[in-house]
Amino acid sequence: MAQRRIPAVFVRGGTSRALLFHARDLPPDRAAWDPIFLRALGSPDPNGRQLDGMGGGISSLSKVAVIGPPSRPDADVDYTFGQASIERALVDYKGNCGNISSAVGPFAVDEGLVPAPREGEATVRIHNTNTRKIIHSRFRVEGGSAAVEGDFALPGVAGTGSRITLEFEDPGGAATGRLLPTGKTVETLDIPGLGRIEASLVDATNPMVFVRARDVGLSGQENPGLMDARTDLMVNLEQIRAEAAVRMGLAPDRRTASESVLAVPKVAVVAPPAPYIDLKGEPVPEEAFDILSRVVSMGKTHRAYALTSAMCLAVAARVPGTLVHEAARPGAPDVRLGHPSGVQAVGAEVELANGSPRAAKVVVYRTARRLMEGAVLVPGSLFTA
């Protein structure tokens, strides 16, 4: 059977890449999406390479997004994010991706989905259907298209680009309905082989579980390769993540969390500032940032830091009593995160509402670039008559 062509755009958004589709070009039955996305990306691949697709063999390069008309009056477009597993036939829609969010506004302008000035600044109001939250994307337009060239440097991405400002409105409770899903700033988890360990479970833009680096035998200065090579460490972190998923109401049990709920929560280790060497081999002095952290996404340590994870960390740093607040240097206007690729600043506004913390807004800066446009080919057998 001949292959089918589906219009698509291949983009880099922040430190991730994804295939972007118009909702109109996909089957109306959402159940038919997953086989298309998996074959387009090359999953499942037991060799972990996604050689037979557009994926890149790591979680940050195995993503899709679907853009369509808005379903809310306060939005210009709807945006649905999918995180495709590499080894399994699974697409997880339970969370959003901040990096790919940065590519949605420029896509909407370039595709003519929203009006924009021929020159100047455009604002696109994005409704992320995964979290039911609104994102305001602001970026420069040149000649009627989203600008690409600029002087903004993003750690983890070579060169510079045109800055995109993303404002995530009211990001708390994106997946669970509560900023602190259990009502506590610190929980004690019982982890087989590790024992009792303290963790902060926080849900802002995406749910996260934070643990002290020292409690799992780390300093927080490690590079991703060293962490991934420690099988015992990765097993322990996955068990922590799975238990957190149960506590947060995202999975009924640990087994389900490890088999089917892969993208959220993500697990991160945190530590106070300390000097380290980034992936370019350059020293990062401790005065350059406010907190040291490493995050694990889909079973692998992120080479930069998943953007929604960085936003959740910044919010958690503003909530007294969390392990993130405990580790972070106090008083900084933005939370400067030291991660494997360098330093990333995130602005977070947290206020008290009826005595409980409420995340009002998170602001981050990214770059994005359209890499290829046309059609992705998938086997025709995926489509029913």
Image (cartoon, rainbow, N blue to C red):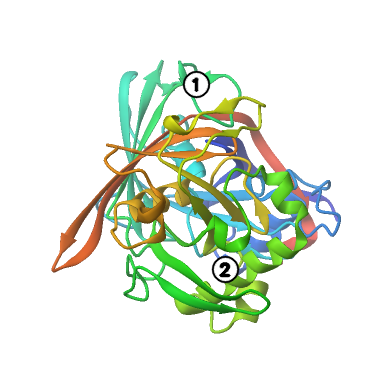
Q: Amino acid at mark 2?
A: Arg
Q: Residues within 10 Å of mark 1 (few under 14, many from 20)?
A: some
- The residue under label 2 is 241
Q: Please give the name of the residue rendered at 75% of the width and 47% of the height, measured from the top-left corner.
A: 57
Q: Mark 2 or mark 1: which is in front? A: 2
- Identified by mark 1, the residue type is Gly
Q: Position of residue 46 (x, y in %)?
A: 84, 60
Q: Quadrant of the C terminus?
A: bottom right
Q: Is residue 375 visible?
A: yes
Q: Which residue occupies 34% across, 68% down?
A: 185
Residue 339 is left or right of residue 2, and the answer is left
Q: Kindly identify which residue carries mark 1.
A: 161
Q: Nearer the viewer, residue 231 or 75?
A: 231
List x then y, in percent, for residue 342: 54, 32
When the figure is inspected, residue 140 is found, relative to residue 249, above or below; the finding is above
Alpha carbon separation for disc pair 2 and 1: 35 Å
Q: Nearer the viewer, residue 267 or 256?
A: 267
Q: Is residue 104 left or right of residue 342?
A: left
Q: Secondary structure at mark 2?
A: helix
Is there CB contact under 8 Å for labels 2 and 1?
A: no
Q: Quadrant of the N terminus?
A: bottom right
> Up-down: is 286 above or below 215?
above
